[in-house]
Amino acid sequence: MPELPEVETISRGLANAIAGKTIGTVDVLMTKIAVAPAGVHFAKTLRGERVAGVGRRAKYIVVELASGRRLTVHLRMTGRVIVQPPGTAQAHPYTHILLTFTDGWRLCFADVRQFGRMRLIEAGAAWDAEGGVEPLSEAFTSETFVSMLDGRRSAIKAFLLNQKWISGIGNIYACEALWEAGIRPARPANRISKPARRRLHGALQDVLLRSIDARGTSVDDYVDADGLKGGFQNELSVYGRLGEPCRRCGKPIVRTVLGQRGTWWCRGCQK
Ligand SMILES: [Zn+2]
């Protein structure tokens, strides 16, 4: 599933590709993918809207419309957005929603497994109230993170994956940041020392920023809005490296299961 760096990369690509364009026609080929508030017609409402910009919140791509409405996109497991130039004969395979802009460019939302959603949000409506702090925002200071862990007895890795606290971190970056900080994934959050919490805060921001620089991690079928794979899979320290030597201490990387998720880590240097 795409995590923060992948969604950020896709959002930036989309911003370059569609900002300023006006939506001409909207084809909804699978109704469950297109979500709108009760009484609001998804396709009719989008018609004529101009794209003011594209951003990201948590794991959502957020298309900002000139009217103040938003179109949020969650890719879930296999969702993809593909931008096609004018004259492209066929929509991408598995396209469920097709936006055609007045200049002939198209945006396809395709999803083999159909878990992804495009959601129309009315101007001013709250939609992300459940989401936690953005880990690359100014609000996420080292001291904020240190105090967030007070009283949290769950395993630190489960804490990092809980979107209620911090947004956008999934399995890959939780594993990588814990390795970078030298912290055992099953360690109860409140039992981590303050210096180690600060190390983990730095490690989280570091792995996310390095991955964004590399245009994300392509371990499954992730590609960005231009159809390009990311490069961070070549820089992973633990994720998917079962049995390979730890880059820090040389011991083999192990895989355990924590909260039903595969967890890669080093018994030698994560305490
Ligand atoms: Zn190690």
Image (spheres, rainbow, N blue to C red):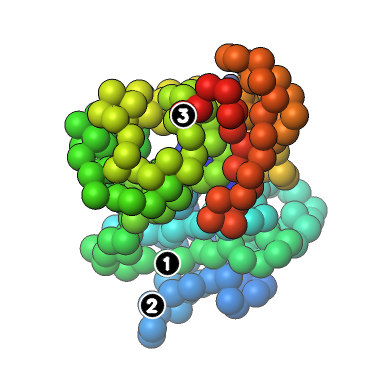
**Tag 2 residue:** 37
Q: What residue type is labelled 1?
A: Leu
Q: Calculate the distance from the C-alpha at mark 2 to the C-alpha at mark 3.
A: 48 Å
- The answer to the question of whether label 2 and label 1 lie on touching residues, with beta carbons closer than 8 A, is yes
Residue corresponding to mark 3: 271
Viewer-proximal residue among 190 and 91 = 190
Give the residue displayed 63% in from the left and 56% down from the top. 77
Looking at the image, which residue is at 48% across and 34% down? 184
Q: Nearer the viewer, residue 142 or 122?
A: 142
For image coordinates 38% across by 77% down, the residue present is: 37
**Label 2 to label 1: alpha-carbon separation:** 7 Å
Callout 2–callout 3 Cβ contact below 8 Å: no
Query: Is 75 placed left or right of 47 in the picture?
Result: right
Q: Which residue is drawn at 59% across and 33% down?
A: 265
Name the spot of residue 22 as percent of width and height, x first: 47, 53
Place of residue 187 in the rendered image (x, y in percent of width and height, measured from the top left) = 43, 41
Ligand 1 is located in which of the four quadrants?
A: top right
Secondary-structure class at tag 2: loop
x and y percentages locating residue 201 in the rendered image: 34, 29
